[in-house]
Image (spheres, grey):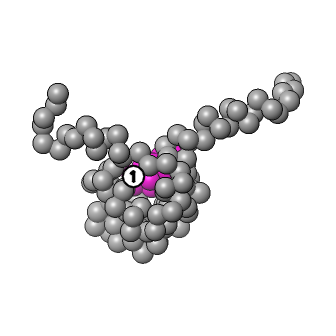
Amino acid sequence: MDTSPGHNPKQASQAEPTIEEVKEWDEDELLKWIQQKRPRLLKGDNLKKFKAADIPGEAFLTKAGNDGFFKNECNLSIRPSLALANLAREIAGGETAGKKSKLLSFIPYTPCR
């Protein structure tokens, strides 16, 4: 068992909220989760800009994978923009992958040539 400072096995399992939970978060709850998940990601000007953007959980999920939104609309630098887009994609994709594959099984498949 790893007993090094900062390692908490329970925290890791609790770190992955559901899509429904994230959708209900306000700006402060989202920021708190991001800071727990990636402690050094948002600091200085990037932290101020992210706070100023007032992004609630539902909007965060809507921008999953869209680093351009975080870079252009929130004026964040590229590193946090990419990381935030990936975090949103992890949450959005984590739960929808199973649903998507079930839904796709009902759609007729016609190969394109």
Q: Quadrant of the C terminus?
A: top right
Q: Front-most of 15 and 65?
A: 15
Is 16 drawn above or below residue 27 in the view shown? above
Classify mark 1: helix, strand or loop.
helix
Q: Front-most of 6 and 71?
A: 6
Is 94 drawn above or below residue 58 in the view shown? above
Q: Quadrant of the N terminus?
A: top left
How many C-alpha atoms fall within 10 Å of the one at disc 1: few (<14), some, or many (≥20)? few
User: Is residue 11 left or right of 28 when viewed as pictured?
Assistant: left
Q: Position of residue 25 (x, y in %)?
A: 46, 63
Query: Which of the 4 quarters of the picture holds residue 5?
Result: top left
Is residue 74 shown to the viewer in this render?
no
Residue located 34% across and 66% down the image: 47
Q: Position of residue 20 (x, y in %)?
A: 54, 54
Q: What segment is highlighted magenta in the picture? A: 78-89
Is residue 89 shown to the viewer in this render?
yes
Q: Main secondary structure of the magenta part?
A: helix
Residue located 28% across and 44% down the image: 11
Q: Is residue 86 magenta?
A: yes
Q: Position of residue 35 (x, y in %)?
A: 31, 57
Q: Is residue 107 magenta?
A: no
Residue on which the image places disc 1: 79
Query: Which of the 4 quarters of the picture holds residue 59?
Result: bottom right
Three-letter residue code for mark 1: Arg
The count of marks equals 1
Residue located 41% across and 45% down the image: 16
Q: Position of residue 82 (x, y in %)?
A: 45, 50
